[in-house]
Amino acid sequence: MDFRFSDDQLTLTESVRDYLAGTHGPEVLRRLDEQGNRDPAIWQGLVEMGLTGLLVPEEHGGLGLGLVEAALIAAECGRACLAEPLVDTAFVAVPWLVHQGDTDGLQAIAQGTRTVPLPHVLNPWVADGEGQPLQSVDPLRNLAMFSASGPADEHLLNLGALMSAAQLLGLADAMLHQATEYAKIRTQFGQPVGAFQGLKHQLASCAVAIEFAKPVVWRAAQALQDGVASAAAHVSHAKLAAGDAAIQTAETAIQVHGAMGYTYEVDLHFWMKRSWALCGAWGDRAFHVRRIDEAVLGGSLPIGPEHTFA
Amino acid sequence: MELHYTPEQEAFRAEVRAWMEAHVPKEPLVTLECREGYDQHVAWERTLASGNWGMVTWPEQFGGRGLDLIQWLIFEEEYFRAGGPNRANQNGIFLLGPTIMEFGTEEQKQRFLPPMARGEVIWAQAWSEPGAGSDMAAIQSKAVRDGDHYVITGQKTWSSRAAFADWGFGIFRTDPDSKRHKGLTFILFDLNSPGITRRPIRQLHGDTGFAELFFDEVRVPVENCLAGEGQGWNVAMATAGFERGLMLRSPGRFQATAKRLVELYRAHEAEASPAAREAVVQAWGAAQAYAYNTYAVASKIMAGGKIGAEASLNKIFWSELDRSMHRTAMQILGAHAELKRFGNGQINQWLEGYIFSLSGPIYAGSNEVQRNIIAERLLGLPRVGAG
């Protein structure tokens, strides 16, 4: 029993975080927003980092890593508000295709020449796919109506929900950071507004919510990786905890920014809108509450102190 | 990340389970906050000690088992699975014990720790004063050096367990000219010393658990001072860290409450509201989240890490979770919630638990203070006011 990441996992996560922080700041989001949402150079950078092949088995030209590593990187994608379809293709579609035994196109994914927008019956549309375009509140999210209804595959849903939860953690962390930094520099009544307890306590409450959502997501990633019978309940728990933390942090962050928070000029809105979108994708809140309910109240999941890792 | 127990850990769990099943009282004990219940709980401390389960993480030389933190978590899970009583000696084993191990002399360790582990000496804490609650640096009670004794004069309040306990610990002003955090000394004292008057305080539920302590020239040998004169604030902060941190409220307690809440909901499903149903689901999730986080922190500490201000995140989370779970139970119970005993004579433990849960966000440093600590030390927001 050791609830820690390995040094390799932490090193990988830090390198991705540093890379995105250096190359994918808010100014990039603004440029994309004005100039068409996708930039092949950004995608190429992710490919060169090996991220498109993160979960592709080594014999197909990838790194052959697991869902825990993918969840850690997905959180970094959330932190950077990355718009490219890396998570959907590399962390949702790839493990699903491997699970299906459909390995033909994996090499192309690892090489970055193929993306796989996967519809699911729970998602009424698909991101970065072909079809009649739909406009999301998130200006960097390319949605399309998918002509046929997607599959109702549970494993695919779990992968999508888990990776959404991981992104929501990163989004929440980033919004808390933005709000905190703003509260340090904006002064009113002769002091930084962050010195007022009214703001401090709201921001502290977000820190609590995020802190206790994180291990839920990591535990769900490990459960899905190990294929344990209860994985679905843990994934739903992760989506619920991370989604609630992100929404609480988004609302707090806009409040802390005051009227500036209500403008298109402040960076926050990109992160907030991505949070709204991901909260509803891959099973909305009601769906995931219901799945936990079925496991916990329905009795299929053993509960109580001796069943922490059931 | 390895989220499976080793065969040795599973064997340890089986050992704890067998002992708990054989020894945990079948009927709930009377509340710790009255003479009868206190005596029952002290007897339980001694039963625990007879099985060498009094304080499992302490080194063997002081009466513990020298177990690591994962084993401690397993122990706690089994303790609460079996419905083990509240610990009469929690101030000693979770707060003072680790403090003495960190700051005490060899003589102090030998003198105080084994009787604590055996449940022979029950400890009360004496931090707060009428004018020093959240603002603990405002302490005024004085300890004046007189030869090889301190002479203590002053008043402490909200001293948990002090109505019945044997010994107490707290910080006192040894430098009369000092201000705030300076000039304070951490002192251990026999609650039956001449000059100490205990005035039990009737609590919200009507029973007396904590007490006011009046010190009228109480003579305490200087060897009862911990870590040297003037070091009191640093020692107390370390103790407070233990209190907010890992050990005071282990996750098993809340997972057990969440499980009982699920059972309560099932029994009242027909009349309960959909909102209560979702609150029950959330309670399970939050108790699990608290457990995962504790395992993560325990793993970090075992690998040589430390916890600092993160302890404040913990304290807020468990105290507000406990209150919300009991509030949900009260809502599910509806009209029955107000009954101290149900029609069948059973004690309404949800009511007792709800009342107790209201103290959680206040004691061990109010949650407002914790939120300030998070904002200032973890988020780096500017400090104001507090000196």
Image (cartoon, coloured by chain):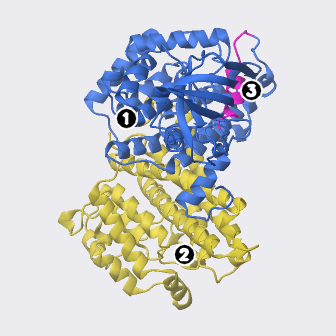
Chain colours: A yellow, B blue
Would you place residue A76 above or below residue B174 in this image?
Answer: below
In this rendering, would B67 be left or right of B258?
left
Q: Does residue B28 appear in this view?
A: no
Q: Please report contact status of discs 1 and 3: CB closer than 8 Å, yes or no.
A: no
Q: Picture coordinates of residue A80 (x, y %)?
A: 47, 73
Q: Where does residue B48 sit, x and y in percent of width and height? A: 44, 14
Q: Magenta includes A275?
A: no
* Residue at x 59% of width, y 17% of height: B165
Q: Name the spot of residue A33 as percent of width and height, x first.
A: 55, 85
Residue B235 placement (x, y as % from top left): 49, 40
Question: Disc 1 marks which amino acid?
Answer: Leu
Residue B135 seen in this snapshot: yes
Chain under disc 2: A
Placement of the C terminus of chain A among the 4 image quadrants: top left
Quarter-of-image position of residue A275: bottom right
Q: How crowded is mark 2: few (under 14 residues within 10 Å), some or many (20 or more)?
A: some
Q: What stretch is highlighted in magenta?
A: B344-360
Image vertical order of residue B265 relative to residue A53, above or below = above
Judge if badges 1 and 2 mark residues of a common chain. no
- Kindly identify which residue carries mark 1: B69
Q: How packed is label 1: few (under 14 Cα within 10 Å), some, or many (20 or more)? A: many
Task: Residue type at mark 2: give it.
Answer: Leu
**Could you tell me which secondary element the residue under label 2 belongs to?**
strand
- In front of the other: A101 or A228: A228
Residue denoted by label 3 = B333
- The chain holding disc 1 is B
> What distance separates the C-alpha of mark 1 from that of mark 2?
48 Å
Residue where numbered disc 2 is placed: A143
